[in-house]
Image (cartoon, rainbow, N blue to C red):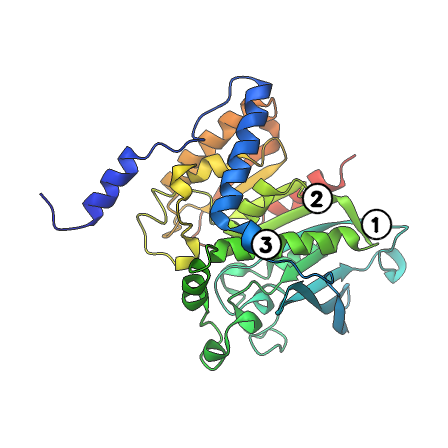
Amino acid sequence: MHTDPSFFLELLYKRQKPAFSYLPDNDDAWRGWAAGLKKAVSDQLGLDRIPASPDGLQPGKMESVDCGSYIRELYTLQIAPELVSLVYVLIPKLENNQLPDQNTKVPAVLACHGHGYGVRDIVGLESDGSPRKGDSGYHKDFALSLVRHGFIVVAPEIIGFGQARREQEMKGEPGESSCFPLSAGLMMFGVNMAGLRVFQAQRLLDYMVSRPDINADRIGCMGISGGGLVAAFTSALDDRVAATVISGYVNTFKDSILSVHHCIDNYIPGILRYCEMPDLVRLIAPRPLLIESGLEDPIFPIQGTKKAAEDILAMYQFLHAPQCLETDFFAGEHQIHGEKAYPWLQRWLTKE
């Protein structure tokens, strides 16, 4: 007998049999599995309960800065009624300092930051918007690395961070998020923070495919930590993502968010009735996927990541596409590595 409720949670996990935690045995079964799991995940995220903006995204350019080898632009997008998203767009300069256009469409990457002071933390800026002077932290300015590898980078201020916080949190420190109050409020409406952020990412994909300088068939997604959640779920549900890098997130729910203290934005009510995390990530197959994780990551332990990667590989093997799944388990903690990711994205998003 235990008074510690964690033993009860362990019992619930052992008794839970996720409906889609199995490997299909033929193509028809796989199509049914994928359609069923996508619907279940969308329902648990509450995506059908989030209203889209009736008048479209209405992009508005707020600034344009010449940063030498690339242009940094800042836009507003009306993604839902009473909800505007701030988005940095980094545009690489081509030969003769020309910018991409409808005649020279280039691949693009949706870049999703994790916890911290927001999108400025991945585009080389301090929290106040000034050029970075100090260390680049665990994000390693990965949006800048992407644009320097020739991609147009679309980097949103993910809801709950930076300038996309509630007024109350804006009065605090730059790294103070609105995750808890927004998550709690959303759950009262049958939505959750993960769902709202995936909805935001899908509206950004709408914007990306509408741009004349982006090759809509060559759109990638890269995210770390909480941004890794966004990258994983968005890529699983939206086939417009052609290649994905997930850093510091892929694991099992059991070994990560059920075993280590995490922000409330990682918890999706009822998700274990349908899948473990590897099952969700399997929905990306057979599209190219790179899983990046530090061997000393304290919040997404490497043993859970390796276990998940094996389960995901089984689906890629079933679909005759094991070459489309790669891993980068590097010496380090919870951080972007990128050494393998950037050339990998170039290979998959620029190959014929």
**Disc number at residue 199?**
3
Residue 348: give x, y in percent of width and height: 69, 38
Q: CA distance from mark 1 to mark 2?
A: 15 Å
**Kind of residue at disc 2:** Gln
Which residue is the extreme one toward the bottom?
Answer: 171
Element on which disc 2 rests:
helix
Q: Earlier in the sequence, mark 1 or mark 2?
A: 1
Using the rendered view, name the quadrant where residue 156 is placed: bottom right
Q: Quadrant of the N terminus?
A: top left
Image point (61%, 26%), residue name: 321
Element on which disc 1 rests:
loop
- Residue under pointer 2: 346
Depth check, mark 1 against mark 2: the one in front is: 1
Categorize mark 2 by other alpha carbons within 10 Å: few (<14), some (14-19), many (20+): some
Depth check, mark 3 against mark 2: the one in front is: 3
280 versus 32 height, above or below: below
Image point (74%, 43%), residue name: 218
Residue 214: give x, y in percent of width and height: 79, 51
Residue 37: give x, y in percent of width and height: 51, 35
